[in-house]
Image (tube, rainbow, N blue to C red):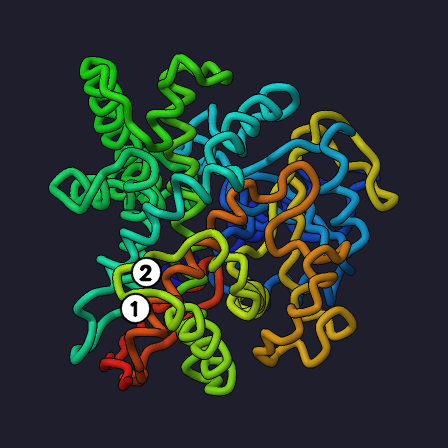
Amino acid sequence: MAVFMVILCVLFVLCICSALLRWNEVRYRKKGLPPGTMGWPVFGETTEFLKQGPNFMKNQRARYGSFFKSHILGCPTVVSMDPELNRYILMNEAKGLVPGYPQSMLDILGKCNIAAVHGSTHKYMRGSLLALINPTMIRDQILPKIDDFMRSHLSGWANQVINIQEKTKEMALLSSLKQIAGIESSSISEAFKTEFFKLVLGTLSLPIDLPGTNYRRGFQGRKNIICMLEQLIEERRASQEVHQDMLGCLLSDENRYKLSDEEIIDHIITILYSGYETVSTTSMMAVKYLHDHPKALEELRKEHLAIREKKRLEDPIDWNDLKSMRFTRAVIFETSRLATIVNGVLRKTTQDMELNGYLIPKGWRIYVYTREINYDSFLYPDPLTFNPWRWLDKSLESHNYCLIFGGGTRQCPGKELGIAEISTFLHYFVTRYRWEEVGGDKLTKFPRVEAPNGLHLRVSHLAN
């Protein structure tokens, strides 16, 4: 009897699950939508998407083509894997396609962050951001700070085993804090780091506000960071002292872009978040690829030793040095391509609109999935090989389908700043040290590129 009841319960649960799946498919079976599946109510296919990543995308494309519907990260979504269509979507924000990042990301990064706004507000906010990180600012104010930080951060690594993932994460965050508010490694930076790491985890989660969820922890991290930044802004205004950093520029009466405190705080969080993910991961993966490709490492080291030979030991990297790092720039682009640090971007429809012959309802997300273009053998011959030399042809950076740093009006405004940070990190790393992997560390490529248990290196001094 007990066995019969168990079987009956299992059959009942299966029927309920089948009915829920069927109901959710019928719910989104509107005329004109692309083919695809929607998964469970509320959760959709988020679990499969986050666990399977690229394989989920490939399987769906094999079944439905390069333009299909799904339900991921809490939103009904159309996925586009077509290069030509992706370029059209990115270049046509004015035609009803605005940023459509997940609700968790919008909540945690703030409603005033540059990724959340569009139209004239986006133009104004982007202008205020570019005023902080334009080439003149990088040359005169930011690069000296980066050099000073990297010189210190990369000292004392010899004759020990380090976790390069942990080191580059600290590097990216602490370097940004120094540039933004002159914050050095101290108690405030340690407290900030703890809350910031919570914030980062929360941005790629379902927006379920329950105790113990990444979303709740991320949102709490944001609140604590806001408190720290509000106190810092209050202290700056009370001191009347002039500070040569990004916060000083944002608070200056001479700044043509007048932002509220809320906008300033969201600006700072955005700069920290966007730079942290890309700079730390690209730096780690560059070290990994250079270790695995000795000829590329030899070429890179040769470029940097030539720069050092012209300097005294205490001389910093300057703007001309940075501009001369052609192979370094190629290594950064090739690392970003091969590791695919950014898998794609999200847009949202502001009205019912036709795309690729289908009718996409207002409010749906469009996931411009750019990962596959990074492995296109026509654009990148032998695409699975780490080959920085391909980027010495500068025309490749401006190719229509090179979307490593985004595209259209949303191309990453911090691109050159990020390249400056990674270049300076590589300069001091390869001119000071040799390294070998301890071994046994695994890498995952989706939804984030990371080493779950760290990436451990045995570091030694570079012999003269």
Judge by depth and name the residue closer to the eye, 275 or 331: 331
Helix, strand or loop at disc 2?
helix
Q: Residue at x 24, y 79 (%)?
A: 459
* Residue for badge 2: 168
Residue 444 x, y percent position in the rendering: 43, 69
Tell me the amino acid under the disc marked 2. Thr
Q: Quadrant of the N terminus?
A: bottom left
Which residue carries the number 1 mark? Answer: 164
> Real-space Cα distance between discs 2 and 1?
6 Å
Q: Residue at x 40, y 75 (%)?
A: 305
User: Which label sits on residue 126?
Assistant: none
Q: Nearer the viewer, residue 441 or 319?
A: 319
Residue 437 location (% of width, % of height): 31, 83
Amino acid type, label 1 = Ile
Residue 137, above or below 404? above
Give the quadrant of residue 231: top left
Residue 12 appears in the picture as rendered:
no
Residue 188: x and y in percent read 16, 38
Q: Are marks 2 and 1 in contact (CB under 8 Å)?
A: yes
